[in-house]
Amino acid sequence: MQRRLLNPKIDFVFKKIFGSEENPKILIGFLNAVLKPIIPIVEVEIKNTDIEKVHVEDKFSRLDVKAKTSNQEIINIEIQLKIPFSHLVNDIPSLPFQEHPLLKNEYNMIQRSLYYWSKLYEEQLGDGDRYDKLCRTVCINILDFKYLKNDRFHNGYRLKEIETNEELTDIEEIHFIEIPKLKKLNSEEEVVDMLEAWVEFLRDPESEVVRKLEMSNSEIREAKDKLYKLSMDEKERELYFLREKSIKDEISALANAEEKGIQIGIEQGIQEGIQREKIETVLRLKSLGLNTEQIAKGTCITETEVEKIIKENIN
């Protein structure tokens, strides 16, 4: 029985394909498709290429791709999987699925991306270095879920003036590529540009569209060949399944922590609601002319507590 190809959206596989020193043309092709530079990227220096088993098993480690391009840019690419529905089923049946906090701000991707961008930018300078040594720095976030509030599958952001939209600089650039937002492609003729081709490869590397693209594009073919070799290698498959498990563990940990926080918040809210209702009842009876003893008997609370509520809420 023929083995299925490994999922290129798992960061371990993505890094093996796009962060490989043996196949720099794959990363070059992808970056040119995303950034669409005036001067095409022709070379990349790929950083942090080693993947240790300890990082594969660590559910909180980042297996991202870092590189410096021939255009003197620092690039970081991170891919994030969606949170499966099963991990969002919690003990709060009244909470609509689409309003679950983990879906509303999945992984806090904007804050996360800005943080990692700042680290990439800051670490370029050593003690005594001048600011003009700082390179243009780009973070590319590939998301297997819908995140931004628009229909475009690719969005790029820079610093701009609020009223005139005048660009301050291109030295900071952050991209979001949302795989589920790419329209369904039925044939290679529907592929408008190479970024759509790359996203389709990530979405379904065994699709008929990708098979046709392999025949016409050497970079897609090289990426598919690399994926095939990884998928047939026993050692790589073992590491893949370890990484897949660690990612699921991370998702479970995040979901469980969030649900626990929600439950605690609800319990606190219930207690606050009870206390507010108690105060309103006491004040309403007081306004009707009842004395402290009568109010205490009518509400089943002590006279001391009645007096305290009246003192704190009536001037």
Image (spheres, rainbow, N blue to C red):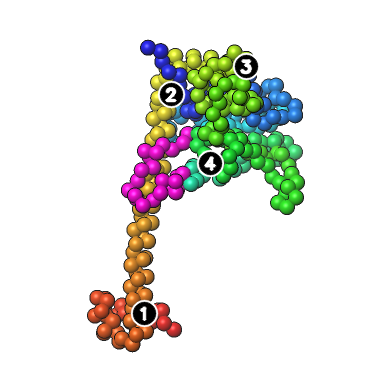
Q: CA distance from mark 2 to mark 1?
A: 64 Å
Instruction: Specify the amino acid type for callout 4.
Output: Tyr
State how many labels appear.
Answer: 4
Give me the disc on residue 283. 1
How packed is label 3: few (under 14 Cα within 10 Å), some, or many (20 or more)? few
User: Can residue 236 be seen from the camera position used here?
Assistant: no
User: Amino acid under label 3?
Assistant: Asn
Looking at the rendered image, the quarter that the C terminus falls into is bottom left
| Near-viewer residue (68 or 262) | 262
The stretch drawn in magenta includes residue 152: no
Q: Between tags 3 and 2, which lies in front?
A: 3
Reading the chain from its start, which is encountered first: label 2 or label 1? 2
Residue 198 visible at all:
yes
At 69% from the left edge and 36% from the top edge, which residue is drawn? 136
The residue indicated by pointer 2 is 240
Which of the 4 image quadrants contains residue 83?
A: top left
Callout 2: 10 Å neighbours few (<14), some, many (20+)? Answer: many
Amino acid type, callout 2: Tyr
The numbered mark, 4 or 2, whose residue comes first in the sequence reads 4
- Residues at marks 4 and 2, CA–CA distance in whole angstroms: 26 Å
Which residue was labeled with disc 4? 147
- Write down the region rendered in magenta: 81-103
Upstream in sequence: badge 3 or badge 2 = 3
Q: Which mark is residue 217?
A: 3
Of pointers 3 and 1, the one earlier in the residue sequence:
3
Identify the amino acid type marked 1.
Leu
